[in-house]
Image (tube, helix red, strand yellow):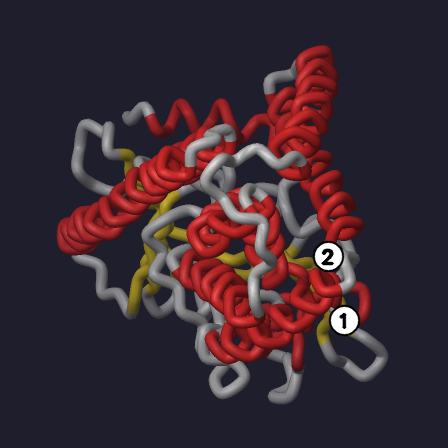
Amino acid sequence: MDSLTQIVLGASVGELCLSKKIGNKAMLWGAVAGTIPDLDVLANPFMSRAESLAFHRGISHSFFFSVLGAFVFAWLVHSLYKKTWHLKFEKIFASSLMFFVALILCAIGVMLKSNLVSLIIYILIIAMSWWFYQKRIIGSYTKSISTEHPDYKDWVVLFFFGFVTHIILDSLTAYGTQLFAPFSDVRIAFANISVADLFYTIPFLTGLIISSLQSDFKKKRWWNYAGIIISSLYMIWTIFHRQQITTVLENTIESKELEYKKYSITPSILQNFLWSATIETDTSFYHGTYSDFDKEKIFKTKEVLKNHHLIADAKDDDKTINILKWFTNDYYMCLVRQDGRVQLNDMRYGTFRGSDYGEDDFIFKFILEKDSKGYYFITDEAGRPSPEDREAMMPLLIERIKGI
């Protein structure tokens, strides 16, 4: 899931584990735990583009790390508390967190094509976050909460549940998570929810914010539970909803009389009402979308040739090609760009327009070149739609959700 959702989930877990001892600082440390697994991206500058694809959501997103990492980070934080160094760390992290949230909201302002709105939001969030940090996190305010420091076991519990809930949530998306690394590189991807879903995050965030403003521990706990329960019920609904969408896809395959090998479905970004499907045949993919508000209960698909012959000259030990095949779960097609280079596209996510399949339309694309030894590598050019295309994506998404 997106970073904000993981921070909210971690903060909620922290509140459940330690708020009775350290108040809202438990949310802060829970947010730390919810952030740590995604810090694997810090290794990107030291890896090739292909290697970073394989490393992300790898060992740091495994059950192995959740157990071992919990003991290690619990020891570090417990040591910080013994020497009161935690106060400086909490201040730095809280400041960084509020700037991060402000930037996200500014980005929303930009999407709304209002720089003035972005500036106002940024200033308000900074001011409110600073007040909240001083009054609600640093200040002693909660009546029924003790001031004793957590022991080592308390920190182990917080970090374990912070890590394990993070990786389980990620495994529910289509991207895939290596839950059993380092013993297996199989990626678990249930694909019942998008990597960012407002309907999951907003109730969670609302309950957490209201909880953080409570002075009574029982009310504090109740509001946090409310956010967890509402978001969890929505998550459960997405699991059953995915099965309904699967039935629609299977009916589509039957009506088109396709001799398929396998298929993949995933919800489009920010919601669970518009779904993308990829059906594989021997030579092609049939890709299309379906909205719950479509008049016909059928996926609107278009045939796209695989063109796998374009990389047929890849050596058996070509690391880049092997990683891309693994990453896409073999749902990839190739095309020749206007500049003559080969581009490999992940068909699971399709295109941001949902109908055009040109070189600039794919959500996940990888531009390939060869080194002096004849091995492929991914260029450093952007693999996502341009800022202009991303800006156009939201109106197109909303229109398609409305149904056809």
The residue sitting at 42% across, 51% down in the picture is 16
- Relative to 345, does residue 55 appear above or below in the rendering? below
Q: Which amino acid does label 1 sit on?
A: Met
Question: In the image, is residue 232 above or below residue 154?
Answer: above
Residue type for callout 2: Gly
Dot 2: element? loop
Q: In this view, does 207 lie above or below 38?
A: above
Residue drawn at 26 percent across, 65 percent down:
260
* Side (left or right) of 399 relative to 43: left
- Residue on which disc 2 sits: 340
Mark 1, residue position: 47
Q: In which quarter of the image is the C terminus?
A: top left
Q: Residue at 59% across / 68% down in the picture?
A: 310
Residue 211 is situated, as x and y percent measured from the top left of the image, at 45, 34
Q: Is residue 34 visible?
A: yes
Does 313 sit left or right of 200 as displayed? right
The spot of residue 250 in percent (x, y) is 18, 55
Q: Label 1 vs label 2: CA separation?
A: 26 Å
